[in-house]
Image (tube, rainbow, N blue to C red):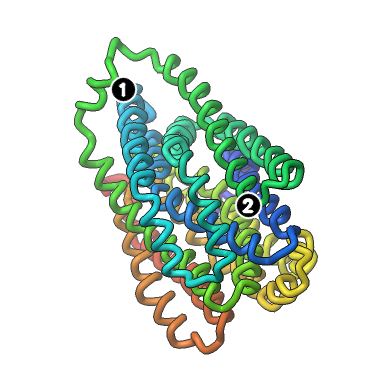
């Protein structure tokens, strides 16, 4: 079967969507939650409420996404260990302990983190006040949020996307309902948005724990104690992969955080407008991640079993559907961008500012879909080094130099640099995969 003949195989399309649809539904619920937060706070009296939540959400998201290696490495390695229940159990236990330790570390250093964020953003006094209020509440659920990453990664690696879907949908539904109650019903404002998210993290942990316990019992392991699983070998591979994915995530969050912090220097209205646009951009990433998840699991299992033909076929099928989804988003944003912005905020200056940058929002899906796809491929391969190198190049050689050369363009310079950054990731990862494909498809491949 050639690389493109899989596009005419109906069974493979059904297989992809049976895995991808639950992830797309659950993933879209995450930015929809952000959109609800933005919409509710965006309809309060002043723009600095929205700006504060945008800045606070960026810092919290930065911490969680920097620890995203907990989810990614767990998914890839669990998929590769599909024939070994003991290895799956070891990955769950070791990943959970690592998540708890990282979460406690963030709690200890919460004040330095808050002060560093304020120093970098140089924002107004009003935004600074409500930003501190938001982060000082949200950060207390961080240990549970990081454990949720491990649980989610483990369930996804075991081909249980529907379980992950219900976990996220239930937690996000709780968050939305509590947003309505706390922000509007009780009038808690920014603090209400933060407490709603804390309650959602607790709910997500409870739901994930229930499903994880169910799957643990199904493993039918011998009488292995948790302490024995912690002592077993395998830390080197886990830590090495986590290190590379952490560096990759650090570069990614550095660019996104720079978008927010530098926008704060351009004014509260620019910061608020970018918050609205970045929330819409998240819809792209979470939808494309559904197809990337299919690539993670299929590539991971194929790599673990050395089924090279299946591996390359899965990549090309994922590439086709990622492109179709990206094209759909580009058309929606181009035609309906101002209407979507109007749904999120009724502050005139924020609307006007955001509408000036809708063209970037329409271009980004087409420029970026390759990087989301190949992230999934290389997570499945458990080759974090390739992802790391692509991200370092795109950040240090593309994003920041291009922004510096065009910074006189103001906010347009930020969006141009972000667009080039995402395109660079797509090209570097895609070209690397094409170079290694000859080895992957060879019957004698030992790659």
Mark 2 crowd level (few <14, some 14–19, many ≥20, 10 Å Cα): many
Which residue carries the number 1 mark?
86
Q: Are marks 2 and 1 in contact (CB under 8 Å)?
A: no
Q: In the orientation shown, which residue stands out farthest toward the top?
A: 223
Give me the residue at 37% from left, 46% from top.
Answer: 106
Could you say where residue 376 lies in the image, as x and y percent from the top left? 45, 50
Alpha-carbon span between mark 2 and mark 1: 45 Å
Which residue carries the number 2 mark?
190
Say which element carries label 1. helix
Say which element carries label 2. helix
Give me the residue at 43% from left, 84% from top.
Answer: 404
Q: Looking at the picture, does residue 284 appear above or below residue 173?
A: below
Asked whether the viewer can see residue 2, the reply is no
**Which of the two labelled residues, at mark 2 and mark 1, occupies the earlier sequence position?**
1
Could you say where residue 25 lies in the image, as x and y percent from the top left? 65, 42
Of residues 371 and 203, the one drawn nearer to the viewer in this rendering: 203
Question: Is 121 on the left or on the right of 269, as rendered?
Answer: left
Could you say where residue 17 lies in the image, as x and y percent from the top left? 62, 41
Give the foreground label among 2 and 1: 2
Of residues 250 and 17, the one drawn nearer to the viewer in this rendering: 250
């Amino acid at each position: 079967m050639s690389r493109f003949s899989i596009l005419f195989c109906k069974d493979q399309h059904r297989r992809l969507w049976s895995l991808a649809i639950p992830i797309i539904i659950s993933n879209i619920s995450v930015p929809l939650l952000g959109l609800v937060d933005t919409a509710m706070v965006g309809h309060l009296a002043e723009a600095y409420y929205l700006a504060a939540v945008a800045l606070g959400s960026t810092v919290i998201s930065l911490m969680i996404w920097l620890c995203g290696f907990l989810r990614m490495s767990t998914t890839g390695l669990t998929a590769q260990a599909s024939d070994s229940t003991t290895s799956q159990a070891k990955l769950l236990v070791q990943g959970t302990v690592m998540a708890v330790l990282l979460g406690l570390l963030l709690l200890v250093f919460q004040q330095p983190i808050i002060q560093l964020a304020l120093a970098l953003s140089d924002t107004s006094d009003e935004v600074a006040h409500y930003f501190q209020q938001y982060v000082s509440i949200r950060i207390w659920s961080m240990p549970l949020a990081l454990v949720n990453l491990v649980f989610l990664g483990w369930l996804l690696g075991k081909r249980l996307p529907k379980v992950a879907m219900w976990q996220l949908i239930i937690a996000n539904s709780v968050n939305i309902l509590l947003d309505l109650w706390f922000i509007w019903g009780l009038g808690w404002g920014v603090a209400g948005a933060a407490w709603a998210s804390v309650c959602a993290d607790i709910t997500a942990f409870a739901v994930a724990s229930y499903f994880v316990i169910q799957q643990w019992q199904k493993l039918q392991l011998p009488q292995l104690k948790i302490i024995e699983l912690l002592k077993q070998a395998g830390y080197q591979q886990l830590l090495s992969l986590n290190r590379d994915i952490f560096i990759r995530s650090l570069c990614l969050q550095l660019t996104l955080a720079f978008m927010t912090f530098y926008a704060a220097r351009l004014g509260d209205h620019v910061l608020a407008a970018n918050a609205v646009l970045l929330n819409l951009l998240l819809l792209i990433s979470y939808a494309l991640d559904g197809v990337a998840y299919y690539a993670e699991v299929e590539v991971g299992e194929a790599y673990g079993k050395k089924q090279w033909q299946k591996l390359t076929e899965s990549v090309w099928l994922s590439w086709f559907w990622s492109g179709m989804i990206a094209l759909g988003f580009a058309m929606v944003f181009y035609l309906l961008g101002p209407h979507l912005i109007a749904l999120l905020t009724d502050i005139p200056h924020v609307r006007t500012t955001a509408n000036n940058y809708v063209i970037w929002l329409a271009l980004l899906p087409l420029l970026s879909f390759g990087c989301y796809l190949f992230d999934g491929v290389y997570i499945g391969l458990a080759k974090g080094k390739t992802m790391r190198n692509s991200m370092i190049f795109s950040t240090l050689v593309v994003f920041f130099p291009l922004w510096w050369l065009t910074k006189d363009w103001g906010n347009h310079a930020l969006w141009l640099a972000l667009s080039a950054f995402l395109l660079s990731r797509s090209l570097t990862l895609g070209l690397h995969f094409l170079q290694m494909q000859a080895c992957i498809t060879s019957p004698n491949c030992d790659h």
